Image (cartoon, helix red, strand yellow):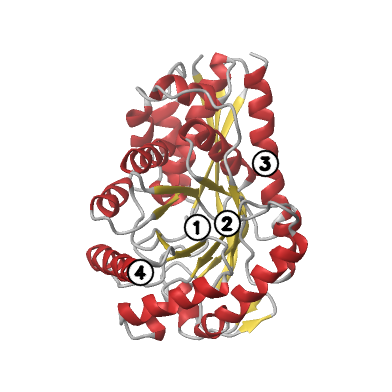
Amino acid sequence: MRVTDVLVTPIAGGFFHDDLAAVRAGAVRDGQAYAGAPLTAGFAAVRVPARGLGLGLRLEDGTVAWGDAVTVQYAGAGGREAPLEPDDRITERLRRDLTGRTADQFRPALPEVLAAAGDSIALRYGLSQAWVSAVASARRRTICEVLCDEYGLALPDRPVPVYAQSGDDRYDNADKMIMKRADALPHGLINNMAKFEALPEYVAWLAARIARLGGAGYRPVLHFDLYGTAGLAFDGDLRAVADHLTGLEKAAAGYPLRIESPVDLGSRSAQIDGMAALRAALRERDSAVEVVADEWCNTLDDVLAFVAAGACDMIQIKMPDLGSIEDSLLAVRHCRQAGVGALLGGSCAETEVSARVSVHVALAARPDVQLAKPGMGVDEGLMLVRNEQARVLAMLGRR
């Protein structure tokens, strides 16, 4: 089955792109907007609607296989790519390089397909989605089956646990997560000092809320993303950060606790050294808190480096930052082989297309947990990811 045309169209993401540098510098919320000037290149305001490009590969039978080229909410931060800008030259290049290509195999053809993306990580992400969708369509199989076949993975027989994120609505959205029994929650969006200072009280509230609403046998992982605020609060004193995290562990009242990006040390090497030292300090305190790498762990090479250094208990494999879905699959596989936890993540700023493809990657690669996405409403992301998992497993069970 050959590609006969390439379609490119602007698309909307599931949330916003936020200028993290401006938020950390104190940009003030004004309803859903932020007041003040942006600080990061590529931002016209501190908060802008998430955007991307839909990439469609039209096949000989008229089927169009879509993939969405998107970046994350905090694009341009922590070594990440800026939001993707539409450009007519992109369409011309993709049509020139991909028209006529045979979509019979995913992995062998992927390097040449991705060459059409140039240096753009977002385009690599979208093209890899579109290509695997085209191959699956040509073979009349699910994306999950194509990935399992080409990477030597066993077909799944059970769903992957799901992690939900609250956005700024930390209380009502936490109730939704608990009532719908998310496996890990709530993220919390602890991206400024006011939220960080209120975190111990919030952790205690959340633990009590789970006990009240969750029902017997429900013991989710409490997972908070601090965006480096603990390091800022304690002027980079990692032992003081470790003391604070053990205090949060007590507030969690026995629920497992994961802390993502407690520090942001400004470079990959510094982040690896700092996270490894923090992890050691927690173990000295007999703490079971798990630290999760995200900032400065953006590519497959970064994942390998963090794992090799023992710098974390889990890695958020943020799919748009890695680019090709192959890199995300290989990152999960490497983490599993090394005994490091894998969160197959992404962003609220993604789309329904990229989220559905990520479900197939998760079912094939088997991370410890998968992010519910896109959006910040909880209901939509949980519904989309869980339903796609259920449908794929139902189809595989009837093969």
Which of the two discs, 2 and 3, labels the residue nearer the N terminus?
Answer: 2
Distance from the alpha carbon under mark 3 to that under mark 4: 34 Å
Q: Are marks 2 and 1 in contact (CB under 8 Å)?
A: yes
**Closer to the camera in the image, 17 or 237:** 237
Q: Are marks 3 and 4 in contact (CB under 8 Å)?
A: no
Q: Position of residue 172 (x, y in %)?
A: 74, 68
Identify the secondary structure beneath mark 2: loop
Tell me the residue that label 2 is attached to. Answer: 349
- Ranked by sequence position, the earlier of labels 3 and 4 is 4
- The residue shown at (34%, 63%) is 79
Residue that badge 4 annotates = 282
Q: Secondary structure at mark 1?
A: loop
The answer to which of marks 2 and 1 sits earlier in the sequence is 1
The residue at the point 54 percent across, 22 percent down is 136
Q: Identify the amino acid type marked 2.
A: Ala
Element type at mark 4: helix
Does the residue at mark 4 contact the one at mark 1 (Cβ under 8 Å)? no
Disc 3: which residue: 386
Tally of numbered tags:
4
The location of residue 51, given as percent across then percent down, is 57, 56
In the visual, does 378 lie left or right of 362? right
Q: Is residue 312 above or below residue 56?
A: below
The one nearer the camera, 82 or 88, is 82
Mark 1 / mark 3, whichever is N-terminal: 1
Q: CA distance from mark 2 to mark 4?
A: 33 Å
Kind of residue at badge 4:
Leu
* Secondary structure state at the residue bearing disc 3: helix
Q: Residues within 10 Å of mark 3 (few under 14, many from 20)?
A: some
x, y percentage for residue 313? 38, 56
Label number found at residue 72? 1
Figure check: 222 above or below 21: above
